[in-house]
Image: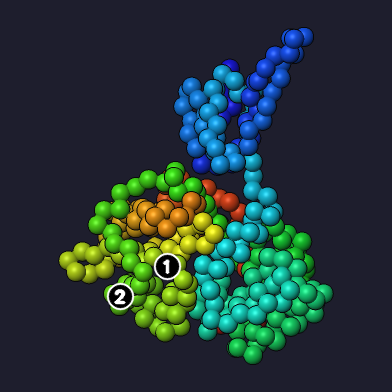
Amino acid sequence: MPLVLEPSWVGRRVSVRRTANVTSEGRQLYSDVVGDLVDLTPQTAVVASHGALVVIPIANVAIARLVPPSTADELALEEIGARGWQAAETEALGGWLLRANGGFTIRANSVHAVRQPRLPLDEAIDYARAWYAARDLPLRINLPTEGRRLLDAALGERGFEPSPDNHVMVARLDQLHGDALDTTVSGAPDEDWFARYRDGQGADPVSRALLLRHDRLGFATIRRDGAVVAIGRGVIDDGWLGVAAVEVAPQLRRQGLARAVMAALWQWGASQGAERSYLHVASTNPGAVALYASQGYWIHHDYRTRTELTPSAATDC
């Protein structure tokens, strides 16, 4: 029988059609199982479906396929991700969320456009432009590329410049394994943690406030000879662990410290009741994408930022 389930699918949502009974007329019946593939051996596949584990003999699998995230899945995860990186100032414009954070990070200084604004598009753009101008910021609109493809096209027609795509990568925590080494995770970072973040940018009050603006936080730290050499930040919303700010001292990179930080955050997240993890990574950073993929993350969807062609006032994404 040809292989219809791939090892790379473990941790992802699948639909499996399996043989069931044979009618008295000799006709083969089938049943479908939809859920997360959590284990696969040459003999069996295990699918987590509706809160139960379904064990399916491989010999009974007629056909299987990956189930891609729906538009609703993408938009829901976008909203969870926005809660994990909260700007100092926000205003709802229907389904748009206007965000400003003193220019620190593009995500925190852009419109989060996951649903429809309460105004016609051109009026919404005018309102958002004035809102950002009052804060000396350019108008940027952040949107999932597939879930809001019509808006993306409309902004392109209006001359908004696209950024390179960013990946939102996800994984089930029970599929992620690693050695946390001597990483510690605490609810509040110390000054050395902030000093490691973005070469000291964490010491700035604006960035510090953004990093601390959440009620379920975990800050991972690795020290060597008393110095902080690797860090990471985790947040939890609706059973999701969001991972960000994973950084390693340049002279100690490629020694497994980033993997240890990630493993420590997974363990912390699981202890806090999280079941899944997400992170954001630039598509232009293939090394980081490969690292996360090797750990078990996969690309859930992409997003980009459309910027009105005015002088930039924000830094990094």
Choose the circle earlier in sequence order: 1 or 2: 2
> Which residue is depicted at the point 30% across and 65% down?
221
- Image coordinates for residue 111, horizontal then vertical, percent: 65, 74
User: In the picture shown, does residue 8 fall above or below 304?
Assistant: above
Kindly tell me whether residue 297 is visible in this rendering. Answer: no
Q: Which quadrant, please, contains the N terminus? A: top right
- Percent x, y for residue 239? 51, 56
Q: Secondary structure at mark 2?
A: loop
- Residues packed near mark 2 inside 10 Å, few (<14), some (14 to 19) or many (20 plus): few
Question: Residue at the spot x=40%, y=83% of the render?
Answer: 204
Using residue 292 as the reference point, say whether residue 80 is left or right of it. Answer: right
Amino acid type of the residue that numbered disc 1 sits on in the rendered structure: Leu
Look at 33% across and 72% down and name the residue there.
189
Q: Quadrant of residue 311?
A: bottom right
Residue 299 spot, x, y in % from top left: 55, 50
Is 70 on the left or on the right of 83, as rendered?
A: right
Instruction: Please rate how many residues cluster around mark 1, counting C-alpha atoms within 10 Å: few if below 14, some from 14 to 19, many from 20.
Output: many
Task: State the residue in front, 223 or 250.
Answer: 223
Q: Nearer the viewer, residue 79 or 295?
A: 79
Residue highlighted by disc 1: 217
Residue 13 appears in which quarter of the rendering?
Answer: top right
Mark identifier at residue 190: 2
In this orientation, does residue 235 appear? yes
